[in-house]
Image: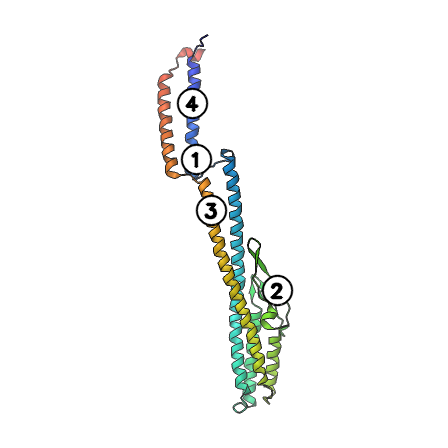
Amino acid sequence: MFSRITNRSIAVGSMTNLQASMNRSNKLQEQLSSGQVLSKPSDDPVVTNNSIQYRTEIGVQEQYGRNNLDGQAWLNSADAALQDSVKVMQRVRDLTVQAANTGANDTTARRAIAIEVDSLKENLLSSANTKYLGRPIFAGTKIGDVAFDATGAFQGDAGVVARRVGPNVDVAANVSGEGAFGDDGATFAMLTDLSTALKSGSGAGINDFITKVDTGLGLLKDSLSTVGARTNQLEALKDTSDARVDSLTDSHNDITAIDLPKTLIEYNLQKTAYETALASTAKVIQPTLMDFLR
């Protein structure tokens, strides 16, 4: 049995083929515009799933990087404060050694030194109350205006301000206030006692303060070493995190980014094929008035 091929059936078939060809051209054009293989999840569910996993891991690594930079900012603030504190204590030591020389200083000279010691104590207190984003960096996890009050008494706690900078890797971004300035601000109490001794005018016992000043200076230097070690650790971890982001991004692009030259050639071929088919179909299908009346 033979079936009759009508002009209508030819037209419908041709239009279906033309529509399919146009859809392929449109898809290639979308890929060229976005630079991505996928325009919607249904294009390739497997690639879509892999892409989501890559993007999730990239986001995690980028968050590690942001945490790392925040930790470095904390430590940089501590480093600057401790550097200033070391300079203050070195000056205090010079003055103490000078004051201990009983043969070259009288009562007036020691009192002048005491005034400078008092000023240096205020400078040290200012450094000890350095803030980062409104928080005293030497106060631990305690929220407050200062880490040490006007008398030098410690107002913070021993809490650790940690930053997650890698898988199960936490690094302390803060430095212990008592570790840097002595238990309950012992360094400040020592400076107060030194000033009192200097103001007494006798000069007795001044020599004993040299060892005490050295102790306070040693605490600051130890804290500086801790800051340096943690900063180096964070910098190394940041390099690792950045390299991981680059690697994951490359892998993600490998499965989602188009091959531009290949896609461009394919688009041009598809466009040419569509235009050729369109012209051929127009010649083959020539509807008459009877076709519209059927």
According to the picture, the residue beneath numbered tag 4 turns out to be 17
Which is more foreground, mark 2 or mark 1?
2
Q: Earlier in the sequence, mark 2 or mark 1?
A: 1
Q: Mark 3 vs mark 2: which is more N-terminal? A: 2
Query: What amino acid type is highlighted by mark number 4?
Result: Asn
Q: Which residue is label 3 attached to?
A: 249
Distance between the alpha carbons at the discs numbered 3 and 2: 37 Å
Sequence-first disc among 4 and 1: 4
Say which residue label 1 marks: 30
Marks 4, 1: nearer the viewer? 4
Q: Position of residue 292 (x, y in %)?
A: 43, 13
Please name the amino acid that badge 2 sits on: Gly
Q: Is residue 258 left or right of residue 166?
A: left
Local SS, label 4: helix
Q: Is residue 90 left or right of residue 146?
A: left
* Residue indicated by mark 2: 140
Q: From the viewer's perspective, is the residue at label 1 or at label 3 nearer?
A: 3
How far, Cα to Cα, is label 2 from label 4? 72 Å
In the image, 249: left or right of 186? left
Q: CA distance from mark 3 to mark 4?
A: 39 Å
Question: Quick one: label 3, few (<14), some, or many (20+) residues within 10 Å?
Answer: some
Question: Of the residues shown, which amino acid type is indicated by label 1?
Answer: Glu
Three-letter amino acid code of the residue under disc 3: Thr
Query: Which of the 4 quarters of the picture holds residue 258?
Result: top left
